[in-house]
Structures are given as C-alpha cells and as structure tokens.
Image (cartoon, rainbow, N blue to C red):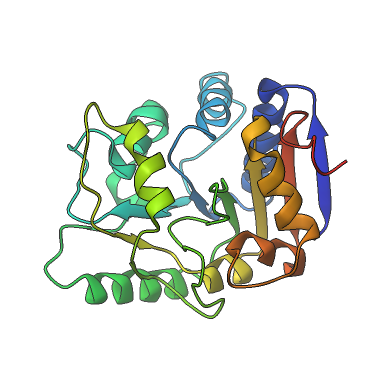
C-alpha cells in the first residue's frame, strides 16, 4: 500500500478521487479504467462531470470497464449496476458505446461472459486504474468473503449481507440471485488501486482491511499487499483506524 489519506468531508474525498482519475488520463489519455457503481462514487462522478464540462478532463480516448452486475439485470433495470453508472456518469460524460466494456448479466452462459471480459481486459493490456468501494463484509466488487485472491472475472454467490444492503438500490424488495464481477486478481494486477470509504459505518471495516490479517475471509485486506494502493477516506470512515 502506498497512501492512506483522510479528508475532512465526503466532498473533499470525492474531489481527491476525481483528481486520481484525471491525473491518470493526463498521463495516459487511452487509459483503461474500472469504476464502481453505487452510492460511494456519486460525489466523484459529479466532480468528474463538472471537470469534463469545464474542459479539464478528457474521456474521449479511454476505455471504461464495468466492475460488476446483478445476475439477470441490464441497463434498463432500475438499481442495476449499469443503470446507476449510465445515470450517474456514463451518459452525462457522453461515453461512446465502443468505449465501454461491461458484463451482460443476462447472458445464457455467464461463464463465457466472464471469459469474454477476461480476454478483453487482457487484450487492452490490463487495468491502469481501478476505483473501489468496500462492503460491510469486506467485499470488493462482488468478491464475497472466501473468494480466492487468484480469481479473474467470475460468477459470484452473494453473501446475505450483500443481498440485504443491495436492497437500497431498488424501489421495493428485489430478489438478488447472484452476481458477475471482476476478480481479486484483476484488482491486484491493476497498475493503481484506489479504495474509497465514507461514513462512520465503514470505520471498523476500513480498520480491519488495513490493520487486520490479510485473508480471503476479508477480501479488502488484499489492499495491504497491492504495490500501488491508495486508500482515501473521510474523517468518519477513518475514526477506528487513527
């Protein structure tokens, strides 16, 4: 791990994460970047959209790789990873379809779909940057506790905590039967990994990820071993670590 940075507020944290994305693109305009969906990155997306509109961020040459998706869901399903990303970032930025590499979680053969993403990422030369949130159970993407550190894209059996927390993205109770996700190996092989966390609820999770044993039982612990991992948190999320 390279960096552990604490910011006073979620807004400061979001700007710092946006800085990493922009500096990556300045260094390599055709960078391959994986960004998460969900609530944690929304502030970062707002900041990136603003910089794009101000002419301070150019996304025209990069490739965007989706992190994960609920099985059976697509872009038009409210609460799907793709729907959230389209709404919060991809559409406002004006990403072209050919710039986006994303799981088809409705594919008949999900294993083949995982192999397609593995092959495409390899062909692109790997991920230059991956930005991640962290689950209450320490998951990264949909790599649940017990997932091998050696996995690439795969079909994920969801932890009960993930099913419960995932309900916040839907209008009513929604059965979540599984997921497809980039693997922990993708994260370790990314040239730079950024882990974001905000809020008091994430404080014990961050403390365990950074101070606890490096173990597949708590996937986020692998950031301790990544050669260029940056952990960016707000003051609330840092409160159990400092």
**Residue 156: % across, % down:** 35, 66
User: Could you tell whether 237 is left or right of 219 in the image?
Assistant: right
**Residue 62: % across, % down:** 49, 50
Q: Residue 101: in sight, yes or no?
A: no
Indicate whether 206 appears above or below 32.
above
Furthest-left residue in view?
108
**Residue 185: % across, % down:** 55, 74
Q: How many marks?
A: 0
Q: Residue 187: in sight, yes or no?
A: yes
Q: Quadrant of the C terminus?
A: top right
User: Could you tell whether 149 is left or right of 141 in the image?
Assistant: right
User: Could you tell whether 153 is left or right of 185 in the image?
Assistant: left
Indicate whether 26 appears above or below 209.
above
**Residue 5: % across, % down:** 82, 40
Nearer the observer, 97 or 104: 104
Q: Quadrant of the N terminus?
A: bottom right
Residue at 71% across, 39% down: 203
Residue at 72% across, 67% down: 226
User: Could you tell whether 117 is left or right of 3 in the image?
Assistant: left
Residue at 43% across, 58% down: 142
Indicate whether 113 appears above or below 89.
below
Residue at 21% across, 29% down: 172
Furthest-bottom residue in view?
150
């Amino acid at each position: 791990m390279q960096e552990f940075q604490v910011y006073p507020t979620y807004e400061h944290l979001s700007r710092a994460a946006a800085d990493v994305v922009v500096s990556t693109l300045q260094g390599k305009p055709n960078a391959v970047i994986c960004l998460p969906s969900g609530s944690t990155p929304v502030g970062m997306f707002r900041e990136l959209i603003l910089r794009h509109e101000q002419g301070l961020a150019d996304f025209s040459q990069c490739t965007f790789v989706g992190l994960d998706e609920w099985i059976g869901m697509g872009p038009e399903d409210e609460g799907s990873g793709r729907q959230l990303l389209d709404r919060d970032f991809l559409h406002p930025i004006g990403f072209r379809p050919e710039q986006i590499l994303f799981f088809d979680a409705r594919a008949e053969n999900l294993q083949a779909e995982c192999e397609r993403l593995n092959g495409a990422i390899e062909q692109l030369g790997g991920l230059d940057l991956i930005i991640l949130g962290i689950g209450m159970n320490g998951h990264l993407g949909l790599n649940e506790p017990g997932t091998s550190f050696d996995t690439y894209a795969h079909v994920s059996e969801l932890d009960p905590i993930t099913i419960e927390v995932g309900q916040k993205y839907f209008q009513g109770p929604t059965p979540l039967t599984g997921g497809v996700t980039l693997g922990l190996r993708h994260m370790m092989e990314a040239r730079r990994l950024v882990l974001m966390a905000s809020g008091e609820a994430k404080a014990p999770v961050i403390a365990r990820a950074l101070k606890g044993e490096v173990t597949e039982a708590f996937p986020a612990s692998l950031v301790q071993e990544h050669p260029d991992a940056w952990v960016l948190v707000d003051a609330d999320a840092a409160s159990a670590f400092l």
